[in-house]
Image (spheres, rainbow, N blue to C red):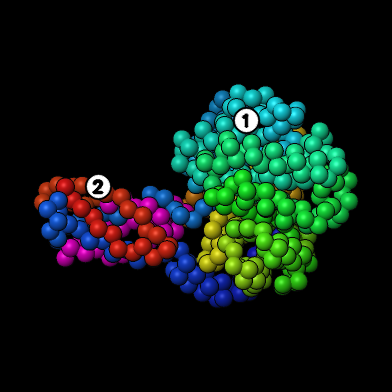
């Protein structure tokens, strides 16, 4: 029964293979024309050139919520190493209730009192910057996590939110490029324990106006769930589509549409309630891309239902298909897995493995930090399969190759000497690069 979740990919394998491969070639790669010259400005020919891709422009990552949250130094070091080896972006927790549990006393500093799964921003940023990982903030106005002291009359809530936005911008706007502004704004009205402002018609629009005022040069993201499930997608009549379309029409500067893709069900439920149909996956992305905004898979969880080798291989196979489909789409700019390790998901006691067939086993690492095939898959996709490394020989002073967008190192050997240079292959069609050799 569990292998049945792979059938939608198998039934449309020709469609998937063609669109994934053609999409990757068209949307993730470009031509570089390198012109070699000496220090005297004269063309240089006959060089042996080793081309090594150092970084990807496309972002792939996970949340960083368990940074230094484990009981032992050995576990914390393992988490730090395994995260840095696999990813180039990290989602940082900015949940208001945990970041500022007491009004006026935010937990910004790395030595702040600990809150489980909510490492302090300064600690996360120190780790990201040391490891070349781009940080991303989640989230400015997530209504469910509004602290009790910030709830009250609507205008009062807005004033406190504006103060929060301003303080975060003053401290972090220059270090964190991307900010999720609202998260899960599609929930029904009058939800228990939600702030009063949440029910107001300008909840999304006001939040983005405030974000634009305080974060004028940052990427602003709307983040929600329920995009890909068959029961939720109705083309441009889908609830998320209408929410985003209305906000844009009302002037909200939404730069990116964030799409969650959590599969918190048993295998049997997934066959009925979720969407693994590749044709629908592309249809959803095409629909939202028509709004003229980039897309991100901001949160994804695919469970390995048990620790059997078969179930872990099924998890990896599903992710292989999904990552290929998402990576190939022209509007997609990032794929962010959610919890890296089993047993530490939201709503569970630390290390609780009693949840059965759901998100408790949704990590890429087992509870003992052993990598699952899915972790190895993601590392190999972005480290080998979708990475350009070549050895070329020039006949003239010009070198041409097609590669994935990102930063490259050139090791150029000529006349018994080797020099190294770096350049960036840009999606915005900056193709020609002049490489000067000393």
Q: The residue tagged with tag 1: helix, strand or loop?
A: loop
Q: Residue at x 79, y 36 (%)?
A: 150
Q: Is residue 121 above or below residue 312?
A: above
Q: Residue at x 20, y 58 (%)?
A: 36
Few, some or many residues within 10 Å of mark 2 (<14, 14–19, 20+): few
Q: Nearer the viewer, residue 250 or 181?
A: 250
Question: Residue 173's image quarter?
Answer: top right
Q: Residue at x 67, y 48 (%)?
A: 210
Q: Is residue 7 visible?
A: no
Q: Nearer the viewer, residue 247 or 122?
A: 247
Label 2 – label 1 distance at C-alpha: 40 Å
Residue 407 belongs to magenta span: yes
- Res. 108 mark: 1
Q: Residue at x 45, y 70 (%)?
A: 26
Q: How many marks?
A: 2
Q: According to the image, label 2 marks what residue?
A: 420
- Boundaries of the magenta span: 382-410
Q: Position of residue 302 (x, y in %)?
A: 66, 53
Q: Position of residue 220 (x, y in %)?
A: 61, 52
Q: Earlier in the sequence, mark 2 or mark 1?
A: 1
Q: Is residue 42 left or right of residue 317?
A: left
């Amino acid at each position: 029964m569990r292998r049945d979740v792979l059938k939608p990919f198998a039934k449309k394998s020709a469609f998937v293979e063609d669109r994934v491969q053609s999409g990757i070639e068209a949307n993730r790669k470009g031509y570089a024309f390198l012109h070699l010259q000496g220090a005297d400005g004269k063309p240089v020919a006959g060089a042996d050139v080793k081309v090594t891709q150092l970084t990807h422009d496309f972002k792939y990552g996970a949340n960083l919520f368990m940074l230094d949250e484990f009981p032992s130094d050995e576990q914390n070091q393992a988490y730090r190493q395994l995260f840095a080896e696999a990813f180039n972006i990290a989602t940082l927790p900015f949940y208001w209730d945990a970041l500022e549990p007491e009004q006026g006393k935010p937990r910004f500093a790395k030595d702040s009192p600990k809150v489980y799964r909510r490492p302090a921003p300064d600690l996360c940023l120190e780790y990201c910057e040391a490891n070349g990982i781009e940080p991303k903030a989640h989230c400015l106005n997530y209504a469910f996590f509004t602290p009790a002291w910030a709830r009250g009359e609507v205008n009062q809530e807005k004033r406190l939110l504006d103060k929060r936005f301003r303080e975060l911008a003053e401290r972090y706007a220059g270090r964190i490029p991307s900010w999720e502004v609202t998260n899960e704004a599609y929930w029904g009205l009058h939800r228990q324990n939600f702030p009063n402002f949440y029910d107001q018609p300008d909840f999304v629009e006001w939040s983005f106006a405030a974000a634009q005022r305080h974060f004028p040069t940052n990427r602003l993201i709307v983040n929600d769930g329920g995009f890909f499930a068959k029961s939720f997608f109705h083309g441009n009549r889908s609830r998320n589509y209408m929410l985003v379309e209305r906000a844009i029409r009302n002037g909200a500067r939404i730069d990116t549409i964030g799409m969650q893709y959590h599969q918190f069900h048993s295998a049997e439920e997934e066959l009925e309630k979720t969407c693994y149909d590749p044709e629908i996956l592309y249809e959803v992305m095409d629909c939202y891309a028509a709004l003229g905004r980039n897309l991100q898979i901001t949160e994804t969880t695919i469970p390995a239902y048990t620790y059997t080798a078969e179930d872990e291989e099924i998890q990896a196979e599903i992710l292989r298909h999904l990552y290929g489909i998402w990576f190939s789409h022209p509007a997609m700019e990032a794929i962010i897995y959610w919890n890296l390790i089993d047993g530490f998901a939201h709503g569970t006691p630390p290390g609780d493995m009693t949840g059965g067939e759901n998100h408790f086993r949704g990590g890429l690492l087992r509870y003992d930090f052993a990598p699952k095939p899915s972790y190895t898959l993601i590392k190999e996709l972005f480290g080998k399969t979708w990475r350009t490394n070549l050895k070329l020989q020039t006949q003239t002073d010009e070198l041409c190759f097609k590669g994935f967008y990102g930063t490259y190192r050139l090791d150029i050997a000529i006349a018994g000497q080797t020099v190294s240079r770096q350049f960036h292959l840009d999606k915005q069609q900056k193709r020609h690069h002049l490489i000067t050799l000393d």
